[in-house]
Image (tube, rainbow, N blue to C red):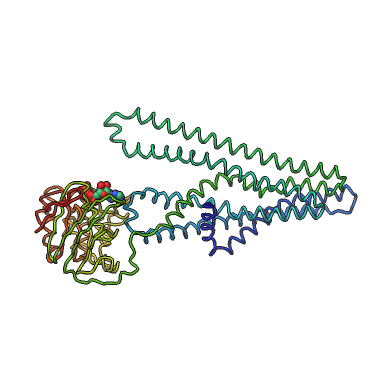
Amino acid sequence: MRQWTIIRWLLSFVKPLKGRMILAIFLGIISNLAVVAISIIGLQGVLAILSQQPVNPQKCLVMMVGCGVIRGVARYCEQYLNHDIAFRLLAIIRQQIFATLRQLGPARLAGKKSGDLVAAITTDVEALEVFFAHTVSPVFIALGTTLVTVGYLASYHLGLGLLLLLGQLIVGVALPVLSYRRYQTSGPAYQKAFIGLNQQVMENIASLQDIFQFGLKEQRLAKLKTSGQALNQQYQQRLAQGSGLQIMSEGLLIGTAGSVFLTGTLLQLPVATVLVGTVLSLSSFGSVLALNGLGSALVTTLASGRRLYDLNQEQPTVSFADSQRVVAELTDVELADVSFGYEEGQGILKDLSLSLKRGQWLGIGGESGSGKSTLVKLLMRYWDPQGRIAINQEPLPTIQEASLHQLESVMEQSTFLFEETIGANIRLGRKGASQEMVEVAAQKAAIHQWIMTLPEGYETKIGGQARSISDGERQRIGLARLFLHDGPLLLLDEPTSNLDYVNEQAILKTLTAEANGKTVLVISHRETTLALAQERVYLKKGGVTR
Ligand SMILES: Nc1ncnc2c1ncn2[C@@H]1O[C@H](COP(=O)(O)OP(=O)(O)OP(=O)(O)O)[C@@H](O)[C@H]1O
């Protein structure tokens, strides 16, 4: 039943492109019928000659060539339309996935199954191309073509028509269902072996330095070989299944044509009827043979569809729908008896109470894994904990999303850089900031001088595939972004962890100067950074020490 839910969900995307899809199906049927028509016209010509009726061979030839041309044009247009539909649908689905992600918020990306998410957005969406371009319309094209060809033969003789229908049903329905069942067991094993090998390759590339340093070459090669062999074995099995299916389908085609011929002969039907039935059987299987690979394709596609469907069904951890309060000025932040765990009974934070007045610095230190970064995420409202977090006495869940983003300038442990210029990356802190504002922010973050040494200065591309930069430079770009954003509440999660002593001091100096009047919550393992705070709190697993 679950498969049908997923198929229905996938088909719901087709609605806006219904017109194109119907046209593609119509053209597909025309293109298949044109092939059948070529042999039927030829046969009718031969029959006319044999029965010494007047026949115009040129006319026959022109009609056959005409059908060939129709076949070519219709097939081209059908393929074009189907792929056009498929790629438009993929774009629509991608938009839907991003809309879902937007709703789920960053909590989803910070969650445990964020790896699945990347697969869902990239490979799973791509995998649906098979469903939209090579599954939906071919099924209807086969249905339409079968109805016309069987109907045509039934107009000569009902029994022969039903024989042809039986052959086409076995090839177009029974075999794909059978192969779908088989691939349901072998498909996931193949997929697992395929992903396993890919992961090995990626891991080997990423760990090249360790492989050389620790002399792991032989060990890694042996592992790679085992994974390669596992995939090869699965591939061979898949190939054998595919070839077996192909042979069965072709055999059924010939079997159907033979049965039609024999039945017609045994029933002493007119020669024309027997020959039309036989030729039709031989030439009309194209559309159902095209459904040959449906079983295996559906297993992979439905697995991808299932992951995307599940993602689409996920509910956000928090909702801002009823959050209407706008907080412009910050007076205080308060946490009262806050307890939180990512899973039931986990207890990362327990009964934590803190208070921060305007302009105050609060330093948070403590052992690794004690929940320091979690605290920042709770202040950003990724999750709603037990207890109360309030800004200006307004409980966090009542504050408007945009207002919260405006209030809080956040710098997490790693700054994400978009594949953009340095200027554009800093400008993310404030839309429409002038070049001068960007440069002032960069100066405050002690990165301006370094940027000016680059040949293209602020126009230098960084992030993604572009120029790579050091962790310290990345962190300082993050700080420049933060200074530009200029929110009254600074949430700094390890702002100096990637900096050397000199740069740490430079940044701390500007932070102190810039944070004049701002309320700051700073997390750090470094006492030199925490020393700036008027009050310090040290978290330990399951508790607090001051
Ligand atoms: N999204 C998540 N899902 C489940 N557990 C998580 C998640 N994020 C963090 N954790 C776990 O929660 C605990 C607290 O993590 P957190 O990052 O808040 O610690 P931290 O004090 O900031 O550590 P560090 O000083 O090493 O950065 C850790 O045990 C961590 O593994």
Q: From the viewer's side, name the closer residue of 202 and 47.
A: 202
- Look at the picture and state if 103 lies above or below 172: below
Q: Is residue 142 left or right of residue 117?
A: right
Q: Residue furthest top?
A: 218
User: Visible in this render: residue 467?
Assistant: no
The residue lying at 14 percent from left, 55 percent from top is 363
Q: From the viewer's side, name the closer residue of 21 and 407.
A: 407
Q: Where does residue 59 sit, x and y in percent of width and height?
A: 80, 55
Q: Residue furthest right?
A: 52
User: Visible in this render: residue 344?
Assistant: yes
- Look at the picture and state if 441 lies above or below 150: below
Q: Where does residue 135 sit, x and y in percent of width and height?
A: 58, 52
Asked which quadrant contains residue 66, the reply is: bottom right
Asked which quadrant contains residue 456, the reply is: bottom left
Q: From the viewer's side, name the closer residue of 143 and 6.
A: 6
Q: Is residue 365 left or right of residue 43?
A: left
Q: Where does residue 108 sit, x and y in percent of width and height?
A: 34, 55
Q: How many marks?
A: 0
Q: Where does residue 103 sit, x and y in percent of width and height?
A: 37, 61
